[in-house]
Amino acid sequence: MRSVAQHRAAVLALVAPLAPVRVGVGAARGLVLAEDVVAAVDLPGFDNSAMDGYAVRAADCAGASDEAPVRLPVDGDIPAGDTRRHVLGPGRALRIMTGAPLPEGCDAVVPVELTDGGQARVALRLCPEVGRHVRRRGEDVQRGRTVLREGVALGPGHVALAAAANVAQVSVRRRPRVTVVSTGDELVPVGHALEHGQIVDSNHLMLCALVEAAGAEVAAGVHLPDDADAVRAFLAAPDGDPDLVITSGGVSMGVYDTVKEVLAADGGVEFVKVAMRPGMPQGCGTLAASGVPVLTLPGNPVSSYVSFHVFVLPALRRLAGRDPEADGSFTAVAGAAWPTAPGRAEMTRVVEDGDRVRPSGGQGSHVLGALAEATALAMVPADVESVEAGMSLRCLPLLGHHRGCG
Ligand SMILES: Nc1nc2c(c(=O)[nH]1)N[C@H]1C(S)=C(S)[C@@H](COP(=O)(O)OP(=O)(O)OC[C@H]3O[C@@H](n4cnc5c(N)ncnc54)[C@H](O)[C@@H]3O)O[C@H]1N2
Ligand code: MOO
């Protein structure tokens, strides 16, 4: 049997970061930079006021206090967005708003709360120090400076910085496109009446949801019957022009395990048993006709779900230009004892309670109730015979749950 690490390495060897594309900065959230971002302007772009108040020369306000306010004539208003160039005369004030450009000659701003708010003349009750409430040009970012590095996954704050620095387009890796294939004659779409022996094709929707939660795109989704010709025809030219195909079902030892039958003959895919529970039967390789990487996941819903996190997610991270190993895994303490499969890494679905984790309920590979509640996978190494309370465990956050939000 192959170890989890060996199979992950085999999966990662199939993929490389996608070619960079240029996109508008507003469309770049969640994508990974393929090139540094350099500021096109200073930030702030001009000296401006940090407060609504009065632009003054600090020296003109000497001695101002509550008891003895200094009175200055007000020469007009400077609203934010005022593109005129104002000059502040000695011994005079201008009413100024937050973000408005400072008039020439001004070296401080007195907030309106410390004045009588006068329009023609203002009484100032405080003498500001030079520079008070003034935001200087370039004090945050200087034009020409690298503000974001290649490899950064753009969050809303990064988008704000690039946009403020007037960078309209950025070079990023696009979202990986994934074609999702579920297989099995027993499956019917959700919402249909079920005959005896039939079940809902929940893996299809689950895998599509996981793909999207991982920041990738569902290129196409299809359900195929356990029919070798249908599976062969689809995989010879998969819909959606995908970067990756994932399949569910049909990879173990059954006589109708069609995915395995077709792809084993195709040549480019190896089928292995991975020392992991759940998710033992796995396949990975490339489709012979198109060269598109394919990962075949077991059909049991929990096995598919776990396999996605352990094998598909690292592949998607690499395609997207992210570090496959930076998966947010964390160490937690077992809050209970639980049994594990001998010789196989146990991927226990757990709920977190502070720094402790405990199994989320039934752990069978068909048990979806406990899966929905789980927030992480405790990755118990293959050589651990059973988990004891207090043991330290590496845990992988599940997509859609705080740390695992893609
Ligand atoms: N003789 C053996 N039998 C099995 C072995 C084995 O080593 N020897 N391995 C078991 C393990 S472990 C797993 S996991 C499953 C994997 O089987 P397949 O990938 O071939 O999946 P199927 O047989 O198609 O389905 C398994 C199970 O999951 C249900 N299923 C399948 N697709 C979906 C779907 N899209 N949505 C919801 N549920 C689905 C299916 O009805 C079956 O109940 O094999 C074991 N057997
Ligand atoms: O490996 Mo199967 O995935 O245990 O149920």
Image: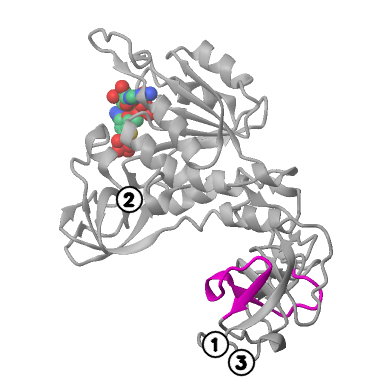
How packed mark 3 is, by other alpha carbons closer than 10 Å (few <14, some 14-19, many 20 or more), is few
Q: Is residue 379 above or below residue 135?
A: above
Tell me which segment is drawn in magenta.
Answer: 102-124
Left or right relative to 223: residue 155? right
Residue at coordinates 17% horizontally, 53% vertically from top-left? 338
Q: Which of labels 2 and 3 is toward the front?
A: 3
Question: Residue 348 in the image: x percent, y percent?
Answer: 27, 49
Work out how far the residue at label 3 is from the one at label 1, CA to CA, in angstroms: 6 Å
Residue annotated with mark 3:
63
**Residue, x 23% and y 35% (percent of image)?**
369
Q: Quadrant of residue 176?
A: top right
Side of 66 where 353 appears, left or right = left
Observer able to see residue 252: no
Q: Earlier in the sequence, mark 2 or mark 3?
A: 3
Q: Which residue is mark 2?
A: 377
Question: Does residue 223 lie above or below 158 as drawn?
Answer: above
Which residue matches tag 1? 65
**The residue carrying mark 2 has its beta carbon less than 8 Å from ligand 2:** no
Quarter of the image for residue 378 reads: bottom left
